[in-house]
Amino acid sequence: MSAALAVVSDADAACQSYRPVLTAIGTPEDRARVIRLVENMPLSANCPLFVWIGRYSPSRTAAQNRFFHGPVLDAIVDQAWWKGRQYPKAFWKEYLRRRYLEKGEFVTPDGEIVPTFYSTTELSRKRFAEFLDAVFRDAALEWGVQMPASVMQEAMANQYLKRRA
């Protein structure tokens, strides 16, 4: 795995602005290049640099997204009954997002709590696989959905679900 680095300035009117830098560090030469980059940037107490280094986590794939929005939601729409009622795909997509992908919440000055949720576009491949695991599990346990064998085969063949130990 490579690490990613972003260098940006807390630019204000007195600061020289920097373009953010995002780069992968996969070799000793990459690391040396990034160290030189940071060493050569002018410093100022009024305009500190922000440096973030972390492990690269690839975003969920378009294929994972098509899988969720196609055969997975189709199976739920076709089979799930909730208190005697079936719901459309748009409902299930939003319901599942709100159920499993809560990001946090804000409190308004009036005291209202406003929850926020991740979009699936913000998820890593691993986090999307965990999301799909939860969807598969609860669709079966709570709404009696049996994923067709072809859906399960696609999920396993493409590693769309979280790997089990």
Image (spheres, grey):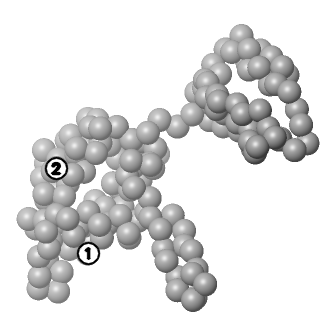
Nearer to me, 122 or 155: 122
Hey, which quadrant is residue 50 in on the image? top right
- Find the distance from the CA under tag 1 to the CA under tag 2: 20 Å
Q: Nearer the viewer, residue 10 or 22?
A: 10
Q: Residues within 10 Å of mark 2 (few under 14, many from 20)?
A: few
What residue sits right under mark 2 in the picture?
70
User: At 8% across and 65% down in the image, what residue appears?
Assistant: 78
Q: Name the residue rendered at 48%, 74% in the picture.
A: 115
Q: How many marks?
A: 2
Instruction: Kindly indicate whether the residue at mark 2 contacts the one at mark 1 (C-beta within 8 angstroms).
Output: no
- Give the residue number, with chain letter if any, for mark 1: 142
Q: Amino acid at mark 2?
A: Gly
Query: Is 24 rendered above or below residue 96?
Result: above
Extreme residue in the left direction: 78
Q: Secondary structure at mark 1?
A: helix
Q: Secondary structure at mark 2?
A: helix
Relative placement, left or right, of 62 versus 110 is left
Circle 1 Cα neighbour tier, 10 Å, few/some/many (<14 / 14–19 / ≥20): few
Give the quarter of the figure containing the N terminus: top right
